[in-house]
Image (spheres, grey):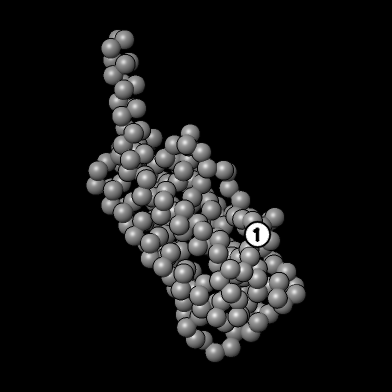
Amino acid sequence: MAARRTRGMTGPDVSRSTVARAASIAEQLRYECSILLELYREKESFTADVLVDGRLVSVTPPSSQLDTRDKLWRLHSALMQCRSLLERAITREEEELGGGKKGDYETQRKMVKDRLSYLLICTGELLKTAGGAALLTPSLEGLESDGPTALFELKLWVYRIFKEVDYWTKTAITTLEALPSVIAKERVRTSRVRTTRSTRR
């Protein structure tokens, strides 16, 4: 089973097409995030330089030592946390700030959520192909999942979540664009190991 997964990941058709599709969705999501952030700043009269401190998502730190599977696991885990936070932010906005009339902002917010879900499907497919275990919906414990109660802090918290989605979308683009070369290097490394073993025999 593991060998079958490895072949799928390094096969030229499956891996390249799936990676390309995921990267394309991530690019679209990055653009849609930028529009959402702009609409939210206009809606709440925030300036572009409003400070948001620290990351909300918790994953293992990046490392050049991570292989393809671990890099995909890290990315997929972060994106799952982003979606959970985004869903919570939308709920809190509608509960505390009122749903009101649906306009450009609400439409864009839904678009970002839907696109993020599509990206998660793609990264999940890549992770499974690479032999990674499926991830459960992450617990938001310790991730400020409920947000503050004061109105301004709540608005700032929602903005932080949008910024977090934007950050991990850009990270997804970087990770996915580098993936073909990482896979190629792993192929070479595997080939060398096999050649060495054959020579020893």
Give the total of numbered labels. 1
Extreme residue in the bottom direction: 101
Expressed as whole percent of the image width and height from the top left, the position of residue 80 reads 53, 57
Expressed as whole percent of the image width and height from the top left, the position of residue 65 reads 48, 34
Q: In this view, does 150 lie above or below 5?
A: below
Q: In this view, does 52 lie above or below 1?
A: below
Left or right: residue 157 compared with residue 178: right
Closer to the camera, 145 or 151? 151
Extreme residue in the right direction: 150
* Label 1 crowd bin: few (<14), some (14–19), many (20+), radius 10 Å: few
Question: Residue 43 appears in which quarter of the rendering?
Answer: bottom right
Q: Quadrant of the C terminus?
A: top left
What residue is pinned by disc 1?
Answer: 53
Closer to the camera, 101 or 137? 101
Question: Residue 117 appears in which quarter of the rendering?
Answer: bottom left
- Residue at image point 56% right, 76% down: 41
Closer to the camera, 30 or 90? 30
Question: Residue 31 appears in which quarter of the rendering?
Answer: bottom left
Closer to the camera, 60 or 6? 60
Residue 23 seen by the camera? yes
Extreme residue in the left direction: 13
Extreme residue in the top direction: 201
Which element carries disc 1, helix, strand or loop?
Answer: loop
Expressed as whole percent of the image width and height from the top left, the position of residue 173 reads 41, 54
Left or right: residue 130 compared with residue 86: left
Amino acid at pointer 1: Asp
Q: Is residue 16 above or below residue 37?
A: above
Q: In this view, does 182 lie above or below 156?
A: above
Residue 140 seen by the camera? no
- Residue at image point 63% right, 65% down: 51
- Residue at image point 24% right, 47% down: 13
Q: Quadrant of the N terminus?
A: top left
